[in-house]
Amino acid sequence: MEVIKAYRLTKKKITKNPIVTAWFLILLFAGVRMTLFVIEVLADVEDLFIEPSRADILFALFFVLMAKASTETTEDTFNNQTLQYFFTSPVKNVHILLSRLFKVFWYNLLLVGVVMSIITMMVKLEGITLPTDHLFYPQLYSLMILAPITGFNISLFSKQESLILKILTLTVYGQILTAVWWILNSSSELSTQLMYTLLLTPISLIITLICTPLFKRAWVAGIKGKNSQILRFHRKKDFLPNFMPTCIRKVAQAEILRRIRNRQIPATVGVTAVLSIGLLFIFHQLGPDPDIGLDMGKYFYPALIAMTAYTVVVIHSVIPSLTLFSRDGKRLWALRTTSASPGSIVWGKGSSSLLFSPLTTIIVILPITIVLHYPTIFILFAVTATLTMYFLFTGIGVWMGIMFPNFDESTRGAPDVMIMYTSLMICLLSGGLFLALPTAILEIDRFLGLLACILAADAAAAVMFILFKHSAKKYEDMEINI
Amino acid sequence: MIEIKDLRKRYDGFLALKGVSLKVNPGEVFVLLGSNGAGKTTLIKILTGLLKATEGEALIDGVSVWDEVKSRERFGYMPEHPHLYDRLTAREFLETMGSLKGVNESTVKDRINKLSKGLELDRVIDSEISSYSKGMKQKVLFANSLINNPPNLILDEPTSGLDPRFTRYIKMRIRDQAVKGKTVLMSTHITSITEEIADRVAIIEEGDIVAQGTVGELFERCGCDSLEEVFIEVVNHARSRA
């Protein structure tokens, strides 16, 4: 059933938006090619400041897929109200569990298969030499099979209502992760390592089956938690400033409240703080002037700050903006039957993302630039550049979100992977385009560089205005028949 | 006043509304009675600006709601299904909606207090909507339709999910609104409710109005003594003709 549903959904998406699909494929190929190019270049560099080992790379890839599978399981299984139809039918719990596990499993494996096929094709066609050994790919595939099962189990255990049971199961099962790390870093033969890794898959699967009685409990706890009143943010009066027009303020406020209560904002703020701490940790480890090879030391921190700022703006602005209307889904009738102008609705929703720009500046930009003793003008440049990204990316996110909304209830309005990837690439390219010139000028003259960056921020704000205006038109023309 | 002129709606080749015309006057409760999928909700969604008519006009106080956003201040709408923002409290939801409908904040606060008392929502008004039962959500929807004290009310299956006590309360409130001079258009497929509160009834079948008039007129026309019989006869007749 899930396979048929996914197939029909994909077919519908492709036929509905063939241009986006084509654009997505181009960007996917370009993204993979760019990554391969970076790997190829870095492989040739001697004395690179970080030399990730084979084990580090494999473990990182395993961890990413595991985390992805875990999040998907939580959203798609343990927070999924529609599973009640299965639980109230004469189907064994173990069969329901296996069907959910299979869904996470085949979907992630398919994704890995597609990406690996593209990489293999490019490597063969262009004769790229990657620094890998003959057992790298078999071991990678064995880990990619293990990762979705591990992710599923971690989600299953972390959703247990009893804290003791949660800690106990996670501690015991966490040993699988330790085992992966230990196997990859052991001094055993590569073939022995591969055998051990392959052994972990059936062990994990057996643990899943043994823990079947916990499955329904986790689902019940998940659904209950969704409706829980605990740990929710309550407010007595309006928390946004009165100078904002009433309609915009009310829409933005409702949007922020919902995101706080859905724990989206606490999660993204947490990730931002972790990234900022990561930057400070790198500074602590490498000092203010690291020797990274290629004579690129002086660009190291500016590049790192730019990458972190991009990531933070994406998680605070682009991803929420993409879902601003699709997450409302069947609730959109409420806004559409009010007399608020479409512009106010779009601005209200858009500002809920824009309002996080000061937070990003405070948490990410200021600490690292201060510890690096950067001159004030450079700090101002970094702040303005972040603001430019906020304006530009929010505009793009809102526009893409309303042009290609995903009203599929089963995904709860989460952005479609093609739309999300395309949006992220457009943001990356346009951000680069807007900030390349000011950065080049900054190299020659700091004051003129800052001035150019301010102009870039103005231009980005203008682009955002235009995109919001167009989004408002599209919103008004949209028929709400969900 | 609500006016619909030769309204047609086509979805991918399927004609959901086949040239519907009707007029609802101030002070009148007009009920759209129809089977499931007859076109009641499509008609209401066009009237509220959620859908665009393929042909014809849907006017509220003489203005098309699709073309004039400001005209949406002129009606209150209650949809059939209680799709609400679960993470907001009922008070937050109603405050937001009131402000977006152009009512000033102190008036919204007063109205929320009055409506929540009348609908017995006052004890849960500051709890998240996610914790509400279906009936409580219906009450929030009803309160939302009245939050801007509009001259026109458009209600899609307003008593769905409500217990008998509140069904009676809602029926009384609907009649009260008409007595106050408001225009009420509601849809339902429950004939007993229609008999009790409707001034005029339109029976809609397969996107077309097949009978229209007061309850008495419909009884007389079909020689029946209950609206249920009238409905079955009219619908069967329409289907046999098709």
Image (cartoon, coloured by chain):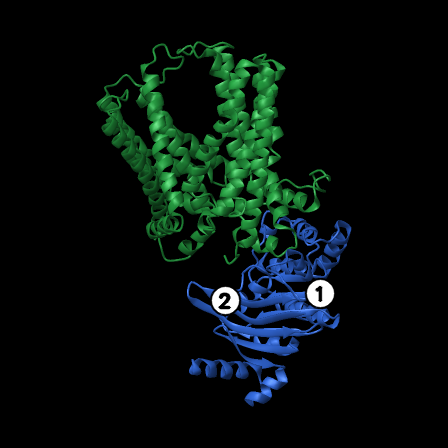
Chain colours: A green, B blue
Is residue A211 depicted above or below A312 in this figure?
below
Q: Mark 2 lies on which chain?
A: B
**Residue drawn 29% across the image and 29% down it:** A140
Residue A245 coordinates in the image, percent (x, y): 70, 43
Residue A180 appearing in the image? no
**Label 1 in the same subunit as label 2:** yes
Q: Which amino acid does label 1 sit on?
A: Pro
Q: Which mark is residue A75?
A: none
Question: Which quadrant of the view contains residue A88?
Answer: bottom left
**Residue drawn 48% across the image and 68% down it:** B16
Q: What residue type is labelled 2?
A: Lys
Is residue A3 depicted above or below B225 in this figure?
above
Question: Which quadrant of the view contains residue A379?
Answer: top right
* Residue for badge 2: B9
Q: Quick check: A308 left or right of A106?
A: right
Q: Mark 1 lies on which chain?
A: B
SS for dot 2:
strand
* Residue for badge 1: B151
SS for dot 1:
loop
Q: Camera-side residue: A338 or A468?
A: A468
Of circles 1 and 2, the one toward us is 2
Residue B191 coordinates in the image, percent (x, y): 57, 77
